Image (spheres, helix red, strand yellow):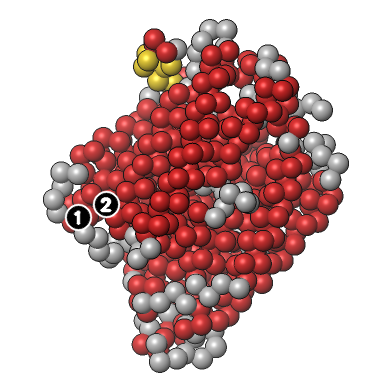
Amino acid sequence: MVAVLLVLIPLVTGLAGFFFKSEGLAKGWALLSSLATLVVVLIGLGMARDSAALHFDCAWLPELGSRFSVALDGLSLILTLLTAIVFPLIFISTWRDKYSKPWNFYALMLLSQAGLLGVFVATDALLFYFFWELALIPVYFLASQWGGERRIQATFKFFVYTFVGSLLMLIGIIWIYSHTPDHSFSIKSFYAMHNKISGKDQTWIFWLMFLAFAIKMPIWPLHTWQPDAYEQAPTAVTMVLSAVMVKMGVFGLIRWLAPVVPVGFWAWGDTVSTCCIIGMIYASLVAIKQDDLKRLVAYSSIAHMGLMALAVFATDANGMQGVMIQMFNHGINILGMWIVVDLIERQFGTRKISELGGLASKAPGLAILLMIVALANIALPLTNGFVGEFLLFSGVFSSAATHYNVVFTCVALLSVILAAVYTLNMIGKVFFGNTNALTSRGVDIKFNEKVVLAAIVVIIVFVGVYPKPVLELTKETADFLLTSMNYKP
């Protein structure tokens, strides 16, 4: 029942949230709901060895061969944990933000959490698609109603990209379903098709489904919706998009694409890996030139997600573990970066790097906490980012799925150097140097903001110093996924 509760709690509380016509009640209800979800995930982690308690299956659409089937394994546990941690931290850190009709805002946030959690626990393809869309729709309304001046244009681009990708994925899902012997959307039936679909059919099915996942991550050249959407969306929504929603794409690759069409995965692995490499270098170079903090963090996210996708196509045991761990780590680290951006914009009314300076003397607490988060973002040893990126690069370098593993590794390593350049450059310009007329009136962050950033720092240091629990959580799932991929040239 654990997996069911993960979906039901935010879904029911989100629907109920529309009826709270008070800002205080709406905020408190959303925070309480998110904390309840976090408790359920922690219970699920404690029951990780009790597989019966983590699975649920019942009739849903029997005429179509679809069941309400949900389950938790290492991959879904680590992503549901990320989702459950992110939402209460968002609600606490943005507690002072004001929204028109706040009850609608927080209700939609909870519905988006329900969709995200459903994506990560679904073991029925049609149910997976249902939650995929459920996660998208609330975010569309959140960004279009509470976003910036260019929110309509940015949100429209985001919706068109993701909706087209979703339709392509649905076509692929229906085709596979129609060819399963038992006409079932079950994940087991889909996995059993890996050696029953011809190589030619696997190629076009691969592209139908891959495009949906690539748009969501996003991978170059399908990334153009992302910087605008991140910039124009309310910061709380940007946090959801960047910390959790982009992980849906990597999750889809691992759970629903590679094990089902391994021939297509193999045939186009080098092509996709090349796109990942180009995107990593391109996004890093663009980030260096950014003067807007939101766009800098947005482009840095493209580079990090490109590295994860590259490691998925390497199909190496270390790399696969690295992908699962780094999805969690990146979500935590990028959330910390977005919180800092929001705190700066809220206090000074600007995100322009050129207009800021010397904040460390005015907000020492913020400066110290940001330094730790930023160093984790560039994978400094003893931070969580180092653990994940070491495994990612190890997997890419050791890959037997490509003849270009050394080239991919060397070029990808350049993005780490570039990440250090734009991150340290941003810190130097914003937090150090002399204060100006704008920043001279700065004050340190409030208690609730320190608590949130401190919680993120604790996770960063804990996973960086003692990664054994997350390694144990992901190892069995990584081995199973690589076996189920049947990845043979």
Q: Secondary structure at mark 1?
A: loop
- Compared across the picture, whether 429 is left or right of 27 comes to right
Q: Return the x and y of residue 305 as percentages of the image width and height.
A: 60, 51
Q: Quadrant of the N terminus?
A: top left
Q: Quadrant of residue 102?
A: bottom left
* Disc 1 residue type (three-letter): Lys
Relative to the observer, which residue lies in front, 347 or 209?
209
Farthest residue to the left: give it.
Answer: 21
Please give the name of the residue rendered at 44% of the width and 21% of the height, measured from the top-left corner.
69
Which corner quadrant holds the C terminus?
A: top right
Q: Position of residue 142 (x, y in %)?
A: 32, 51
Tell me which corner region of the image, top left, top right, bottom left or bottom right, holds residue 296: bottom right
Left or right, residue 427 beside residue 436? right
The one nearer the camera, 258 or 11, is 258
Compared to residue 271, the image places residue 482 above or below, namely: above
Identity of the amino acid at label 2? Phe
Residue 105 got which mark? 2
Measured in 3D between alpha carbons, the distance from the residue under mark 2 to the one under mark 1, in whole angstroms, is 7 Å
Q: Is residue 488 visible?
A: yes
Mark 2 Cα-neighbour bin, 10 Å: few <14, some 14–19, many ≥20: many
Q: Residue at x 36, y 48 (%)?
A: 140
Give left or right: position of 295 versus 84.
right
Residue at image location 53% in from the left, 7% down from the top: 182
Q: Which residue is mark 1?
A: 101
Q: Whole-percent x and y of residue 394?
A: 76, 47
Q: Residues within 10 Å of mark 1 (few under 14, many from 20)?
A: some
Q: Report helix, strand or loop for mark 2.
A: helix
Residue 357's place in the image compared with 90, above or below, is below
Which one is nearer the viewer's eye here, 407 or 278? 278
Residue at image coords 74%, 56%: 412
**Residue 112 rendering spot, x and y as whole percentages:** 36, 43
The label number, if any, that marks residue 436 in the structure image: none
